[in-house]
Image (cartoon, grey):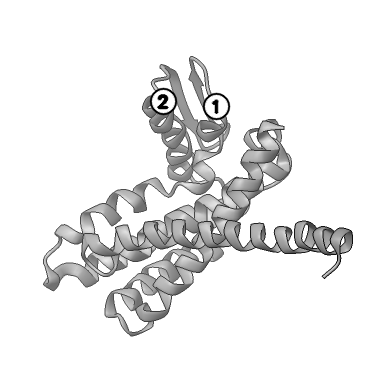
């Protein structure tokens, strides 16, 4: 029951993030940094299509396991060992865990996120180069995700397939919004995106609650007492 309620909340939050993401991204069409971001993303796409998708890239495996370890550290879980090999894949052994730790590599673009938080500190004359690198690093997260995201993935199977896909979609919406907000080059857009994602989520819940109230409570009252 707890996982059902959590999954429902994440689904609604994901929709709210989607609305906030759309509102954030539309003005970026006229932003030179966004164009540089798309070029960087496209460069990684070319590498992925012609070279990397045919084999497991060591750096993608390493980033996957490091993300597990970083989030585990944030939850104060001890990391016993971390292994990454191209031929055998990767593994990380922890003292304890949770669903966020298990699913983090599928929604958290860690290298791109680190660079995104540095973007407001970059001088304007260099922002295009950093945006290019940011797009490339986001591609580093996005394209391997297409290969890793399947029903037989142990992290997803153990966390529950439906719950995992809802969590991963919502998380990707949120962190893509954070990354795109960084292209504006100031901290204001980070907080504006987070605020709008919460406001849209609250609006969805309120509108759905009003619908249920009108549909069941008001109609039941009218059927019982007349109008």
Image vertical order of residue 142 relative to residue 131, above or below: above
Q: Residue at x 26, y 53 (%)?
A: 117
Q: Residue at x 42, y 79 (%)?
A: 26
Q: Secondary structure at mark 2?
A: loop
Quadrant, the N terminus: top right
Q: Secondary structure at mark 1?
A: loop
Q: Where is residue 79? Give x, y as percent.
A: 42, 19
Image vertical order of residue 160 relative to residue 28, above or below: above
Q: Quadrant of residue 206?
A: bottom right
**CA distance for labels 2 and 1:** 9 Å
Q: Mark 2–mark 1 contact, CB under 8 Å?
A: yes
28 or 81, which is in the foreground?
28
Q: Which mark is residue 98?
A: 1
Q: Residues within 10 Å of mark 1 (few under 14, many from 20)?
A: few
Quadrant, the C terminus: bottom right
| Image-based side of 203 in relation to 1, left or right | left
Q: Is residue 149 visible?
A: no
106 or 173, which is in the foreground?
173
Q: Quadrant of residue 169?
A: bottom right
Give the mark, 2 or 1, whose residue is nearer the N terminus: 2
Q: Which mark is residue 75?
A: 2
């Amino acid at each position: 029951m707890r996982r059902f309620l959590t999954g429902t909340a994440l689904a609604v939050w994901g929709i709210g993030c989607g609305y906030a993401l759309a509102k954030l991204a539309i003005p970026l069409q006229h932003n030179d940094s966004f164009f540089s971001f798309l070029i960087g993303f496209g460069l990684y796409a070319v590498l992925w299509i012609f070279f990397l998708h045919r084999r497991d890239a060591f750096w993608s495996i390493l980033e996957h396991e490091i993300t597990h370890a970083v989030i585990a550290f944030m939850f104060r879980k001890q990391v016993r060992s971390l292994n990454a090999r191209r031929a055998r894949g990767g593994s990380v052994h922890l003292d304890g865990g949770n669903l966020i730790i298990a699913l983090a590599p599928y929604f958290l673009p860690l290298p791109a996120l680190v660079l995104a938080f540095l973007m407001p500190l970059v001088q304007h004359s260099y922002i295009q180069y950093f945006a290019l690198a940011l797009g490339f690093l986001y591609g580093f997260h996005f394209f391997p995700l297409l290969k890793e995201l399947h029903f037989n993935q142990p992290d997803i199977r153990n966390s529950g397939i439906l719950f995992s896909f809802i969590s991963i979609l919502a998380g990707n919406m949120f962190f893509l919004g954070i990354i795109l907000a960084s292209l504006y080059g100031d901290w204001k857009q980070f907080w504006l995106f987070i605020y709008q994602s919460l406001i849209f989520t609250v609006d969805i819940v309120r509108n759905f609650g009003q619908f249920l109230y009108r549909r069941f409570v008001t109609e039941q009252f009218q059927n019982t007492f007349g109008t």
